[in-house]
Structure formats: structure tokens, C-alpha cells
Amino acid sequence: MGAHVSRTDFEWSYTEEPHASRRKIILAKYPQIKKLFGYDPWFKWQVAAYVLMQFIMLFVMKDRSWPMIFLVAYCFGGVINHALMLAIHEISHNLAFGHARPMANRLLGFFANLPIGIPISISFRKWHLEHHRYQGDEVLDTDIPTYVEAKLFCTTAGKFLWVFLQPFFYAIRPMFVHPKSPEPLEIINLIIQLTFDVLVYYFFGGKVLVYLIAGSLMAMGLHPVAGHFISEHYMFKKGFETYSYYGILNKVTFNVGYHNEHHDFPAVPGSRLPEVKRIAAEFYDNLPQHNSWVSVLYDFVTDPEIGPYARIRRKHKGLNS
């Protein structure tokens, strides 16, 4: 089973999450960063291009062999679908059309969701915004693994399996840790997605539908682009709870690697986060950072000091009124 993790509990913090205070300090020194707030007018066209790529692949993958279905899903389709998941992440912050047009953002989210095969657009937003506002909260931040996960997957082999199954934990965990009633838009998201999936199955066959859904699931687990799930907040250096990555995979993930910058300034679209780092370089250059998402996955699985317990938690204080 491999080495057992050395940690037996999460790292508990009794201070506030670091991003709000750093935001104030940076804006006091560099008020020009406020000019980067808003939405990216080019973003919707990038999303449309990714969706169009997958629509074309419906024709390309029709009648392919099963090995080819899974190979292309892992190497290509999964990367595109993961990019669309991170587009949904941007959309959850209203960075497609701005806060003044919330429904336009939601509609684009429905569209970006289509090739993913599983309805996530509205549900993701429900919990993700609380991850920003209450980072580390033992109840409200559902990005943090549960005690059950941490205790079950506490060996090298266990961590390998946990990474492989990460999409399932990521999807199911919020419903147990912090359950919420379905919203009307979630029902609409579900109906639109199921209708699309049925149409894909009817016109292109089951293999093509598997290509879409399997690609989404594989690219959230043991896959280079999925390294960001672990690189963002797992404590690779004691006391630091958010980490940035500035490598090439940002090109296909809407700069989600600029994660300290994103949490400091969630109103800045991904395309402008490198400019935040350039302006306020002294605040970011000396923070611990990752150079490779593949290395992050390898270190997470093999290093006994890292595992599901390697997260900073805070006691639940309840929602602000």
C-alpha cells in the first residue's frame, strides 16, 4: 500500500484567510489594479471556440474503436472539457458579461456545459463563491476533503486512488458537507444537459457520448491539467494555503494557475491576472509556488507529508448576515 501519511489531522488556523487583507494592502499601493476589474469581451468567443471544437469531434469520433475513444478523450477531449469547466469557473464570477448581466452569464454557462456531459454550471457556482468568501471554513468551504476521505486514503496507494476518483468526491462532497436545496436554474441546467446528451446518443451513438463524459471525468483525475485541484490549496509548505502556478498549462485553463492573484482579486478575469502579478510582483514572487502540475500530482501521491489532511481549516463561524 506504500507509505502512510504522517499527518493525523488538518492544519487548523485561528486567523482570517489571507486574501482579503492582502487585497487591501495591494490596492492601497497599486490602485491602478482596479482598472483590471470587469469582464473580458473576448472570453465568450474563446468559450464558443472550445464548444465548437467538441461539436466537430462528435462527427470525428463517430464509429471509432473503444481504445481510440478513450485515448482521444484523455489526450484531447478531456483537455477541452476541462477548459470548459474552468470557463464555467470564470462565468461563476460573472466575468463573461459582468455583474450587470447575470442571466447572460448563466446562459453562457449552460452553453459551455454542453460538451462536458454532466450538468455542473449552476451547482458549481452555489458552493464556489463560498469557497472564496469563507476559505478554510470547515463547513462552508466544500473544497476541503472530509475526515472520511482523509482517513480512508492515507497511504500511497490510497492517495493514488483518491486522485483517480477526485471528480466523484468533488461532485458529491458538497451535498454531504453543506447541502443546499436545488435552485430553479439547476433544474433548467439539468434539463438542457440531459436533452443534449440524448440528442448526442440518438444521432451519434453511445461511444460519442462516452467520449464526452469520460473525457470530462478523466481530465479531473489522473491528468496533467487536473493538477491544479491539488496545487491551489494543499499545504506543500507549512502555513501557506494558496499557491500559484505560472507554467504553460495556463494557456488552456484560463490562467487558473494564477491562484493567489485570483483569490486576491476574483473580480479580475483570468486573462488579466498576469498583469496583476506584473504590477504587484513583490507580493507574489516570494510566495511558495508550483512549477509543474504533473510534479504536484506525483508529490501528492508519494510524499508522506502530503495528503488529504494537508489543508488549512478554520472553525465554522456561520454565514454573515
Image (tube, rainbow, N blue to C red):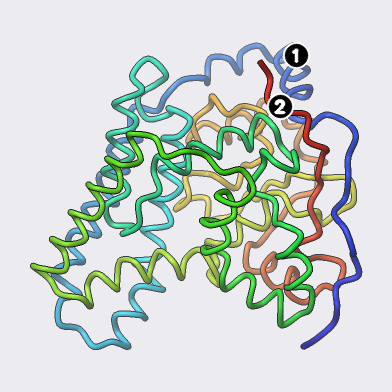
Quarter containing the C terminus: top right
Q: CA distance from mark 2 to mark 1?
A: 9 Å
Q: What residue do we see at 85% from left, 54% from top?
A: 10
Residue 80 lies left or right of residue 3; in this view the side is: left
Identify which residue, 57 or 125, lies in the foreground.
Answer: 125
Residue 113, disc: none
- Please identify the residue farthest to the left as the structure is shown: 203
- Give the x, y percent position of residue 174: 58, 49
Of the numbered discs 2 and 1, the one sitting upstream in the chain is 1
The residue under label 1 is which amino acid type?
A: Lys
* Number of numbered discs on residues: 2
Q: Position of residue 281 (x, y in %)?
A: 73, 32
Q: Is residue 250 above or below residue 156?
A: above
> Would you say the residues marked 2 and 1 are in contact, meaning their CB atoms lie under 8 Å apart?
yes
Residue type at numbered disc 2: Ala
* Crowd band around label 1 with a 10 angstrom C-alpha radius: few (<14), some (14–19), many (20+): few
* 215 displayed left or right of 170: left
From the viewer's side, name the closer residue of 242 and 7. 7
> Percent x, y for residue 232?
67, 50
Residue position for label 2? 280
Residue 251, x across and y down, in percent: 47, 50
Is residue 62 shown left or right of residue 295? left
- Which residue lies at the image location 74% right of the left edge and 29% below the top edge? 19
Residue ID at (63%, 49%): 246
How packed is label 2: few (under 14 Cα within 10 Å), some, or many (20 or more)?
A: some
- Tell me the quarter of the image containing the N terminus: bottom right
Q: Which residue is mark 1?
A: 29
Quadrant housing residue 234: bottom right
Toward which corner of the image does residue 183 lie, by quadrant?
top left
